[in-house]
Image (cartoon, coloured by chain):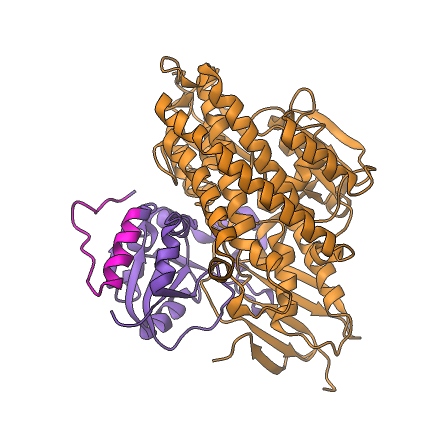
Amino acid sequence: MAERRREILIDPVSRVEGHARISILFDERGAVSDARLHVTEYRGFEHFCRGRLVWEMPRLTSRICGVCPVSHSVTSARAGDDILAVAVPRTAEQLRRVLILAQWVQSHALSFFHLSSPDLLLGRETRAAERDFFAVMRDNAEFARRGIRLRKWGQDVIARIAGRRIHSDYAIPGGVARPLPERDRDIILDGLPEAHNTMRQALDIMKALLETRDGESEMAGNFPSLFMGLVGADGGLEYYDGHLRIMDAAGNILADGVDPRGYRDIIAEDTEPWSYLTFPYYAPLGRDAGMYRVGPLARLNVCAHTGSPKSDHELAEFRQRGGGRGPEHHSLLYHLARLIEVLFALERIEELLIDPETLRTDTLRSRAFSNRTQGIGVTEAPRGTLFHNYSAGSDGVITHVDLLIATAQNNLAMNRSIRQIAAHCIPRADTDVDERILNRIEAGIRSYDPCFSCSTHALGRMPMQIEFRTEEGRVLGRFSRTPR
Amino acid sequence: MEGRMSIGSIWLGGCSGCHMSFLDLDERLFQLLERADIVFSPLSDRRELPDALDVLLVEGAVALSGQAELLRDLRSRTRTVVAFGDCAVVGNVTAMRNHLDLTSMLRHTYGAEGARMGHDPAHHLPAMLDEVLPLHRVIDIDIFLPGCPPPADLIWYTVHELLEGRHPVIDEKRLRYG
């Protein structure tokens, strides 16, 4: 072909929550010049939530995402706590904490088993028709069953506390709606040994896989960036309270003890005409140097310890991978970090549930009317730090909403990842590009476990098409991943 | 029903919660796969749209350019189309933006050029529709499965009836929105 390749479009990115496309651009020599992640919908929550009551917000914003509804409803309730200016009873806080951790378990299980295991377990040469969790269920039934049961356990914890698995009306400004019956607590605890057993096996599988893929770190994006996450007063891994810590690529702490209420002082957002997802960055360093990552990899990088024995043991081993000299940069390690976080969640859920305070039935909610005109709630969602920021009148009617969602904060890094992987996989203008190569680029996105549902929504299933164009935009050829 | 049932699923404008509720079938997924094939889904890399499909689950409402065309195409290939969850059935939270001015929303978030989002083919973005529509405004629907999301037991009942060759009855006992 005399005319050069201009652009490849992957549409849609599969096995991610929500919808996106990827385009790969080529320069005049036929080398990869850029790659873009196009997130293809905007849903408008910030707008239609205006005029609603602060007490409605947890139920409404839960509908931002069916994968991590607990994160939105609890974070929204925390913003509501702030508007009411109340202290939440300890029992309510502990039950909210268990909910968030249970959601880490079910969401991380979904990411590892249901979405990414086909990339991790099946060989590179596996064709699209055989590359999904249903194929894993058929060919590796025991592994799949363990993943299904781990996710089920996490969902069951949520249902026993909050009344249902998805979109409960449990977290409310000031506290929670109901106590946890002792019998349900006991059933939850009974499931822990199997969950630990599953995690042991999953960790072994993931570590073995990292051994065999040593030297392929560029396959998921390996580059310096900043990292951000919540840490507790002692610097430990935190998910409900605490302050923001920002670390640079060498491990220097750039900012610590940052009150999350001041997040808009340190985080700015940019936009591009080719994505509905915004591009947040650490404002003091500007867009390029201020690229930061959030989520499991970032949380394990910025924290001093997890504070629980099994996960702390795994964290120490995790830190030796890079020689213990600083934060881990490989996005492939998101998968391992996610599993370590499940272990942490299992340990911490047990600690919280054996505390008799968690079972109290008398103090679950602090009642007040609207006492402040602004409220900010922050938690660590499965995919990273989540901010809900509301303004309200003295009647509790919402007048302004600002949401900063985890996946958006990884937007610059995800774009960097796919550019790196594309340049590696398509080194020359005449490299044959088939759908297996394109899946490697998609797998790079999956390591972040992005949730485009949270920020966006999506076109449904379309056959993937690749178009080859000339500089003038004339289409030279088209190919569908699976032509019909 | 003779032979294996072919099932497809897509998500349009929504939150993925209905698909998560489908995964909440848990171990019943193994039972389902004994008698049915998931021929395409957001959880799968299989991209081809089959010529003929027994059951299509559609989560979400029609919110973007291109979605109505995709729905009509899939309708023509499918025996039984299920409006899967409240957004698909009535628009629900996805349609809450309908009374707002789209241009000012887009300008607010994306600046002065925001209103052009989704209108330049080079940017590979669909345009947002002025009005979010429930599925029945675009295609004929065979089964309305309400719920935000529909509970896994209701999904199982529906799929099981279809596997047995019966039309599921979503009566007062099973009809629940929200």
| Residue located farthest toward the left when viewing the structure as drawn | B172
Above or below A361: residue A289: below
Residue A365 image position (x, y, % from top left): 39, 18
Name the one closer to the observer, A381 or A198: A198
Residue positioned 39% across, 70% down in the render: B69
Q: Residue at x 48, y 34 (%)?
A: A102
Residue closest to the far top: A362
* Residue at image point 72% right, 26% down: A256
Q: Quadrant of residue B50?
A: bottom left
User: Horizontal and vertical percent for residue A417?
Assistant: 70, 55
Chain ID, orange in image: A
In front: A116, or A240? A116
- Against A92, residue B26 (above or below) is below
Asked whether A217 or A51 is in front, the reply is A217
Between residue A204 and residue A259, name the one nearer to us. A204
Query: Colour in which chain B is shown?
Result: purple
Residue A171 appears in view:
no
- Image location of residue A455, percent across then percent down: 52, 48
Q: Answer whether residue A383 is magenta in the image.
A: no
- Is B167 inside the magenta-drawn segment? yes
Identify the magenta region. Answer: B153-177
Q: Position of residue A477 (x, y in %)?
A: 61, 83
Q: Is residue A233 left or right of residue A39?
A: right
Q: Quadrant of the C terminus of chain B?
A: top left
Q: Is residue A76 left or right of residue B92?
A: right
In this rendering, does residue A224 appear at all? Answer: yes
On screen, residue A241 versus residue B49, left or right, reads: right
Determine whether B97 is above or below A429 in the image: above
Tell me the quarter of the picture where residue A3 sits.
Answer: bottom right
Where does the N terminus of chain B fall, quadrant-wise?
bottom left
